[in-house]
Image: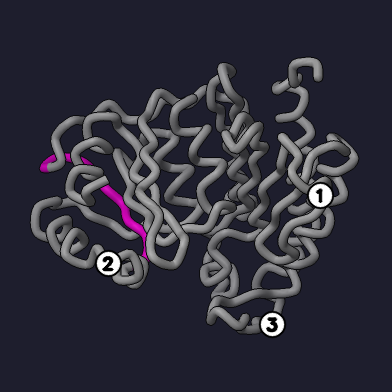
Amino acid sequence: MPPLDLPELARAAEAACDRARAEILPRFRNVSVEIKADGSPVTEADRAAEKVLREALHAALPEAAILGEEFGAGGTRGASLEWVIDPIDGTIAFSRGIPLFGTLLALLEDGEPVVGVIDCCAIGERTVGWKGGGCFRNGRRLRASTASDLGRALVSHGDVFCFDRAGKRSVFERMAREIPMLRGYTDAFGHAQTCAGAIDAMVDLDLNPWDMAATRILVPEAGGRCIVTPAQANGKSGLVFGAPALAEQLAQWLGA
């Protein structure tokens, strides 16, 4: 198989996100919410966006498998290439009319992300990058934070119940005690702001593959460090990412 044209595939991923925006934005603050079997919310916008993403990505790279939050796995079983999709990461925010949600999209080659997009469409910010190509927001190159002092850093975290599910409530409590500027910028928004260096580091636990894949390529391409925590009992994992020194220190707190 010839080498992948990663810049071209990144453009295809952006075009797919354009189609998803056309499904999501007209429904923002104008959609009903359902509760899935796992207790998480879902809306018509999630499903409609994932359908058009799948169509666009299959057209761009027919040989790739596709894994999405709403419709599961599809395409060629055992393929070395796989698109991973979360049509609306932050459905709680979306369903409550809060514009801090986004579409997460990544292309994996042999299990490793090589293209990533975080599209925060309600605030008009799209973060995109590819292996060896850098990380950009709306065309401008991003740099992750280089902070090294947790006492002066802005650190974000996912929902506290996710620390509970991961068996790491004590780590959250330590973060609350020892990090003065600890804030809960969750989901795609927090990930994108960490890529940009606005947030120095983030800890996000109890994640599915589609929650993690884009960040795993975007943060390193922005010069940051992204550490995947060991698998939990429920099969999920977590991420610690941002400024390299801070990510490594927080990963030690987690035992990762």
Residue at mark 3 to residue at mark 1: CA–CA distance: 21 Å
Q: Quadrant of the C terminus?
A: top left
Disc sitting over residue 32 in the figure: 3
**Of marks 2 and 1, the one in the foreground:** 2
| Magenta span | 151-159
Measuring from the top left, give residue 142's x and y in whole percent.
Answer: 47, 26
Residue 176 location, quadrant: bottom left
- Residue drawn at x 67%, y 51% as measured from the top left: 85
Observer-side mark, 2 or 3, equals 2
Query: Regarding mark 1 in the picture, which secondary structure is present there?
Result: helix
Q: Which residue is mark 2?
A: 167
Looking at the image, tell me whether mark 3 or mark 1 is earlier in sequence order.
Answer: 1
Residue 50 sits in quarter: bottom right
**Sequence-earlier tag: 2 or 1:** 1
Left or right placement of residue 18 versus residue 215 in this view: right
Question: Can see residue 154?
Answer: no
Q: CA distance from mark 2 to mark 1?
A: 38 Å
Q: Indicate the quadrant where residue 45 lies.
A: bottom right
Q: How is the image coloured?
A: one colour
Precedes in sequence: disc 2 or disc 3: 3
* Disc 2 secondary structure class: loop
Mark 1 burial class by Cα count in 10 Å: few <14, some 14-19, many 20+: some
Where does the image place residue 48, in percent across and percent down from the top left?
A: 80, 65
Residue 161 among magenta residues: no
State left or right for residue 2 relative to residue 187: right
Above/below status of 37 relative to 101:
below
Q: Is residue 156 magenta?
A: yes
